[in-house]
Amino acid sequence: NAGVMQNPRHLVRRRGQEARLRCSPMKGHSHVYWYRQLPEEGLKFMVYLQKENIIDESGMPKERFSAEFPKEGPSILRIQQVVRGDSAAYFCASSPSQDNEQFFGPGTRLTVL
Amino acid sequence: GEDVEQSLFLSVREGDSSVINCTYTDSSSTYLYWYKQEPGAGLQLLTYIFSNMDMKQDQRLTVLLNKKDKHLSLRIADTQTGDSAIYFCAETSNTGTASKLTFGTGTRLQVTL
């Protein structure tokens, strides 16, 4: 059983471009969480999704950020018109249910030039 | 709101014990976790403790929970150079429909020869 997969592992964008980060949860997991880790800081919750539904987006910035978890395919975190402050590591975690352990992917390190 | 705090840095000699401390504020926490993050990598769950427990031991790892003081500690016995990493404590409470993790700022453990 493969673990949580994220791609790309490293992403470089220029200011104003769009960034798309993908997360494939573990097999059998229908709950996905996105976290952001700024340099030298802990992880901050962004959004929690189940298949086709956003359950909690209380940690998402109000503008430019969106997330989806379609019926088929990976979960996508989309950042439009990136700015330098978006440079961070973005981690995805998945779990089989709300009360279960979250398994983390290796992260996508976004650098905005 | 929730807040989880840790000291930033700990240095120990190889073979000694390491004790990493964490304080949290959310009294409704149900599970408390310890994660390990090696440079450039994702998070690895080391151990967790349910909030109605005082102690949990797992090989070289001992977790102590003082719920009254909202204090959590991780003891690593016989610390090895491979234990050098950043250690995050995290808590979760099932509030409504989400069980998001709230992370501490991380403690960087340096193991010296």
Image (tube, coloured by chain):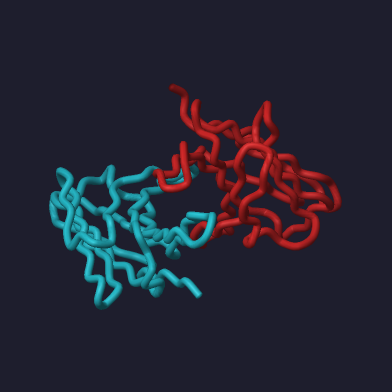
Q: Residue at x 63, y 61 (%)?
A: A59
| Residue A103 against residue A113 in the figure, above or below | above
Left or right side of B111 for A102: right
Left or right side of B24 for A53: right
- Specify the quadrant of the image occupied by residue A36: bottom right
Question: Farthest front residue?
Answer: B96
Q: Residue at x 28, y 47 (%)?
A: B83
Q: Residue at x 21, y 57 (%)?
A: B63
Chain coloured red here: A
Chain coloured cyan here: B
Question: Residue A19 placed where, x, y %?
Answer: 76, 43
| Residue B105 against residue B86 in the figure, above or below | below
**Circle count:** 0
Question: Residue A90 placed where, x, y %?
Answer: 60, 48
Question: Residue A104 placed where, x, y %?
Answer: 47, 41
Q: Residue at x 45, y 61 (%)?
A: B103
